[in-house]
Amino acid sequence: MKIKSKLLIIAGSDSSGGAGIQADIKTATSLGSYAMTAITALTAQNTTGVLSIVKISSEEISKQIEYTAKDIKPDAIKIGMLHSEKVINAVIKSLKKIKAKKIILDPVMVTTSGVKLIDQKAIIKIRKQLIKKVELITPNVPEAEILTNLKIQSVSDMIFAAHKLINLGAKNVLLKGGHLNGKTITDIFVNKKEIKIFKNKKIPTKNLHGSGCSLSSAIATYFSCGKTLKKSCELAINYVNHSIKSNPKYGKGNGPLNHLISFKINKKYL
């Protein structure tokens, strides 16, 4: 497989490898992009939960972004966990400095196990400023509820919330419906001109750790390779669903996906 693009990932690290930077790198690599990183936090965690979080300073995060991009210019940016208002301000400033385009924001706020990852000031900064700076925001239902102050219990609620995010300044929204009850997962792509609904059968598994990180990174990878944003969402949803179906069942809690589902290894390496 030839490298098709270069992707800069700004996110936290997951020591268990299922989510965060590790999931982002695996996703980008398996889909043909060269992954670069700016780590925002270090976590000690496994499939059962988070033991500890060490936050990286805004100065060091900016250095990672700017020094990396100075040498290898990214075709797209994926943003994950940003733990404070100060860090968000620093990231916005650095992305402007490197003239970043094609930015995908996954507003990571709470882990699968329920641990809160960012503070209230950071949430307000995302809502009022950061969503206006990116091409796409990819919240799940709980994250969309926090950003919009709405209760989301149905597909119509999702559409209403997505439009509220557009009114807040988001250019495009992919609202993920995996948290809603039912046998079908509905994901909704919305901008000022259109609504596109993606429906997929819900896969009965607890091994979903890192699915949101992987989805946003897959979107960023396809987008960096020249696909349209809507097509990137469609292809990324398909990739993540196949990765979930083929999960390796690692760990005693919420296990990881199989990010290698897209890999075809030349026989001479086997």
Image: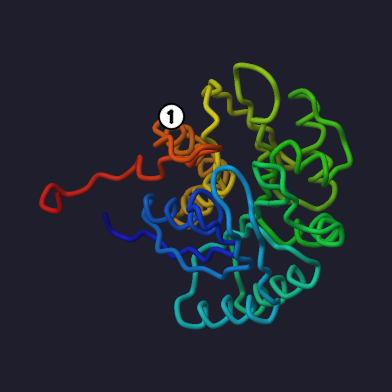
In the picture shown, does residue 168 fall above or below 176? below
Left or right: residue 119 versus residue 29 is right
**Residue hosting label 1:** 245
Q: How many marks?
A: 1
Residue 88 lies left or right of residue 174; in this view the side is right
Type of the residue with mark 1: Lys
Q: Residue furthest top?
A: 183
Q: Position of residue 87 (x, y in %)?
A: 74, 71
Q: Residue at x 75, y 68 (%)?
A: 88
Identify which residue, 65 or 70, lies in the foreground. Answer: 65
The structure residue drawn at horizontal position 43% and vertical position 29%, both measured from the top left corner, is: 245
The residue shown at (54%, 44%) is 47
In this view, 106 is above or below 191: below
Single out the residue that lies furthest toward the right.
149
Q: Residue lying at the far left in this picture: please name it.
A: 268
Residue 267 shown left or right of residue 154 in the figure: left
The percent position of residue 256, horizontal first and vertical second, equals: 48, 42
- In the rendered structure, the answer to whether residue 78 lies left or right of residue 150 reads left
Q: Nearer the viewer, residue 10 or 21?
A: 21
